[in-house]
Amino acid sequence: MKNRGIEDMELVMVDAWNFTPGETRGGVDRRDVTPLQILQPQGPSFRVNGYFVKWQKWNFRIRFTPREGLVLYSVAYVDGSRGRRPVAHRLSFVEMVAQYGDPNDPLYRKNAFDAGEDGLGYIKYFDAHVTNFTGGVETIENCVCLHEEDHGILWKHQDSRSGLAQDGKIEAEAKLTGILSLGALQPGEVRKYGTVIAPGLYAPIHQHFFVARMDMSVDCKPGLAYNQVVEVNVKAEQSGEKTNVHHNAFYAEETLLRTEMQAMRDCNPSTSRHWIVTGELTGYMLGPGSNCLPFAGSGAKFLRRAAFLKHNLWVTPYACHEMFPGGEFPEQNPCSGKDWLHGLSRIGLLKKLILFFGRFSAFLLVVVVSPLSAKTSQSSTFMAAPENDEKSLHQELSLIILLADRVIKSAQEAECSKLDCADLAKQVDRLSQMLRSTVRIAATTQSLYDRPVRRIVADVAKNLDRALTLVRKCKHSGVLRQVFSITTTADFRKVSNLLESSIGDMKWLLSVFESDGANLSLPPIASNDPILSWVWSYIATIQMGQLRDRIDAANSLASLARDNDRNKKIIVDEGGLTPLLKLLKEGSSPDAQVAAANALFHIATDLERVRIIIDLMGISVVVSVLGDSPMRVQTSVVKLVSEMAGLDPVAQEEFGRENVTRPLVSLLSMDTVLDDPKVQTGKPSIHNLVQINKELAVKGSNPNSRSSSFSSHYHSDGSSRGAHYRKERDREAESPEVKLELKVGCAEALWKLCKECLLNSRKVTETKGLICLAKIIETEVGELQLNCLMTVMEIAAVAESNPDLRRAAFKPTSPAAKAVLDQLLRVIQEESSQELQIPAIKAIGSLARTFPARETRIVGPLVARLGNGDVDVATEAAIALGKFVSTDNFNCVEHSKTIIEFDGVPSLMRLLRTTDRINEQGHVNCLVLLCYLALHVGNSKALEQARALNTLEGGARSVVAQYPDLRDLFAKSMHNLTLYQAGAHPHRQTYIP
C-alpha cells in the first residue's frame, strides 16, 4: 500500500439541533389529528398456509432473501371458469443504486441502501431465516408483514411495499424518507449540489434507482405458450385531406421486441410509451411509473458497475444464474460499463422463457418524503372484469327466468305468426318451470355442484335471446314493418329446435340432482362430447350423493382418468379435484377414502395437475389422512404421495413442510425392532433426551414398552389412548400381504421425496429413518429392500453436495451411519443382483468424503467390483472410486494408495478395454479414475506395468475433444507419469487436442 498524501478537510463546528418529536426547531407536535384506527372484527380477507397466501382472486407464495428482501413466487389470478391463470413466476427488487450529485470526496463514489415497512389494521407477520457469518441460521422475527388497506398509509422513516389489487393490478411503491447523508459547510459557503438543512449543514442531492427482476408467466405454458413483449407508442396521424381532416387523429402503434439488443428500451412520455407482456390470451402492461435517466456523465465511477441504469427496460432470455444485473458481488465486480452491453447479443426472445429488468427512479432535492412507484396491470381482459366477482347462481337463474317471462309476454303480444309464437311460448314456459325447479334445488342444497348448471343455463340464455328477437319481429302488423322484419317458418323451426335442446338439457340437469346415483344419459349440450356429461354426473354425485353412490362415482372417475390425458384434463377443468379431496378428508368410510385416493392418483400424472392439487391445499389433506387412517387407505394415499413427489419438486417441498416423512417412517418401521443394542451405543444428544422425555410424558404408565418410538411419538397429538389401541389391534389383524404392500409404498414415497431434496433428506435422518432403512435392507428382500436402498442412495446423493447434512447424518461414529454403511457393504459383497448393487455402490461413492484414510474396508469391496462380470456394476464402482481419489477429497492420496494395494489397476485396465467397445460414458469415467491414480501415485509400479501412460495418451484425443474440462486433468496426470516411469522422457510433449 502506498500513501499518496493526506488532505485536511478541517473541522466545521455546527450548533446542536435536536430533531426528536416535539423539539424540531422549537415547534410542537400537531394536535388536530385524531387517532386513526383500522378495525377488521371478522379478521382479514386473506388466508395464509405457511408461506402460501390467498387473497380475493390472487394466490402466491412469499420468500425473503438477504439481498432482495421480499420475493413473490407463483403469482396467479383465479379467473372465473378459467380457474387459476399464471401471472408471474418470480418478482423481486434485485438492485438499488443511490447516486450522489456532489463532486466532493467521497460523495462522488458513495451509495447507500435502505429498507423498511409500516402496516395498519390486522397484520400477519412472517419470519425470515438467513445465514450468518459462521454458517448458522438466524431468524429475523416479523420481517415481512401482510395486511389489507384501502390504498392509504401512514409512514415513519422508510417505507417500501408491494401490493396486489382487486382489479388484477400489481403495484410496488417506495417512499424515500430515510436518514440523510450530510455534509459540512464553511461559514458563508453555499453549495449548489445540496439543500441547506441547518446552519453549517447540508444534504447532497441524489438519485435513487430501483431495479426489479420480473420473471413473468402471463398465461404461460412452457412448451406450448410463451410470453412476448410488445412496445406501444402513441403517434399522431399526419394531417391530410382524407386521413386526418380535423387534425385530431392519433393511434397506438405496436412493435414486437424480437431480440435482446432490440429490447433495451427507454421511457418516452411524448409517445406515452409502455410495454405489454402478452400471454396465451391475456397481457400485462408495464407502465413507466416514476422514472428518469442518470444525470451523471458516462464516466461516473458508479456506472462502471451499474451500466444497467442506462436503459429503463431490459428483456433477456431466462437464465437461472442471472439473478442480479450488478453481479453476485457488485463491489468486487471489475467490469466496465461496456461489458454489460457486450453481454447482450442478438439472441431471439420468441418462444423462450424471458426475464424483465425494469428500472424506476426518483430525483431528490431533500424533502420530507418523496414517493415513487411502478405498476403492472392487465392489458387484455380476463374472462370477466377482474374487480367483479362471478354472479351467484341464484342471480343468473333469476335473470334467465325474467328473460323467459319477457319471451312469453312478447309472444302473447304478437300480431302475426300467432300460432308459431304460441308454440314457442309453450316451450319457453316449460323451460321457465324447469328453471324455477332448479332455483328451488339450489336454495335447498348446501353443496350444489354448479358447473353443469352454469354451462347449461348460459346456453339456455342464448337460445332465449334468439327466441325473444324472433317474437319481437311479430309484434307489429304494418305492411312496411313486415317487409323489413320478415319471418319464415324455417326461422321458427330453427328456434324451436334450439329451445327443445335446452329443454332436454334442463331435463337432464334436474335428473342428475334428483337421481340416487350417477346419471349416464346424454344431454344435447354434450352430444359431441359424451365424456363431459359423464364427468358432470360423477362429480355431482361425489359432491351431493349418498355415500355408496359417491364411492361408485369416484371409482368411475378413476376409470375415466386411466383411459387418457384428455379425460384427466376435463375432470380438472370441471372442478373434480375439490370434491375428491373433500371425500378423502371426511373419513366417513375407508372405501370412500380409497376410491378418492385412487382417483387423485390417476389424475395427478403431470406437473400441471399436481400444482393444482397443491393450490387446493391438497398436501395437508393427504398428510392428515396418511397419519390416522386404516391401513388400506394409507396404502392408497402413500401411492399418491409417491406419484406427486416424483413429478414436482414443489410437491416435495410442500410435503416436507407438512412433515410427511414422520408418518412414512413410522409406517415403514412397524413390526421392525429398532432397539438393536449394536445401534444404541452412541451417547444421546440433548435433542434426543428432550424428545424421549416428551414421549415418556405421553406414554405415562403405558406398560406396552415394546411399541416403536415412532408410533408413540406420532400419536402424541392429544388423541385418545383407546383409539390408539384400537388402531394397533386393527393393524395387527391385517394380513402380511397388506402390510408388505404398505411398506413397499412407504419406502418408494421416501425415495421420491428425498430425491434431490435437502429438506426431506434432513427430516428422514433426524428421526430413526436411517436405522429403519438399514434394518429393512438387512432383513427384507425384493421390492421393499430395493426401495429402501434407493432411499439411502438419494439421501447420500443430497449429502454429497451438502456438507452440513453429510457431517450430521453420516458421521463415522454415528450408530445410524454405521448401520447403513454395514448394510451397503454387505449388499456390495454378498448380493449378486445388479439392481441392488448399483444403488449401494452409488451411495458409498456419494459419501466418499466422510471416510478417513484408515477406513480401508470401504475401498476394498469397491475395488473388487471393478472386476465384476456386469459392466454396469463395474462402471459404477469406477465412478465411486473416482470420488474417493478426486482432488476434492482430502484423503485422495491415501485412498489412491489403498486402491493400488488392493490390486485395482489390472481390473481397471480390463474394464477400460471392455467399456471402450460398449459404453462410451463408462469409458470416460474409468479414464478419469486412472488419471487421478496417475496424479496421486504416479510412482506406482502397477501403473507402469499396466502401461497406464499409453492408455491415457490414446484416450486423451477423443475424450478431451468432447469434454474440454478434463484437459488439465489429463495433462497433469500424463506429465506425472512421465516423471516416474522408466523410458518416458521427462520433457516429452504429450499431444492433447
Image (tube, rainbow, N blue to C red):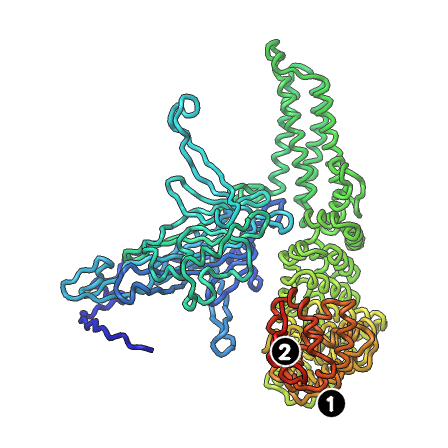
Marks 1 and 2, the one that precedes in the sequence: 1
Tell me residue 59's x, y (percent): 56, 55
The residues tagged by marks 1 and 2 sit, at their Cα atoms, a distance apart of: 47 Å
In the foreground, 309 or 740: 309
In the foreground, 208 or 762: 208
Q: Work out whether 596 lies above or below 957.
A: above
The answer to whether residue 762 shows anywhere in this view is: no
Residue neighbourhood size for the residue with mark 2, other residues' Cα within 10 Å, grouped as few (<14), some (14–19), many (≥20):
many
Give the amino acid at mark 1.
Pro
The answer to whether residue 40 shows anywhere in this view is: yes
Residue at 64%, 75% in the rendered image? 800
Look at the numbered disc 2 and give the secondary structure of its residue: helix
Q: Which residue is mark 1?
A: 677
Q: Which residue is mark 2?
A: 973
**Quadrant of the rendered image containing residue 830:** bottom right
Left or right of 579 on screen, residue 51? left
1 or 2: mark nearer the eye: 2
Residue at 23%, 64% in the rendered image? 24
Look at the numbered disc 1 and give the secondary structure of its residue: loop
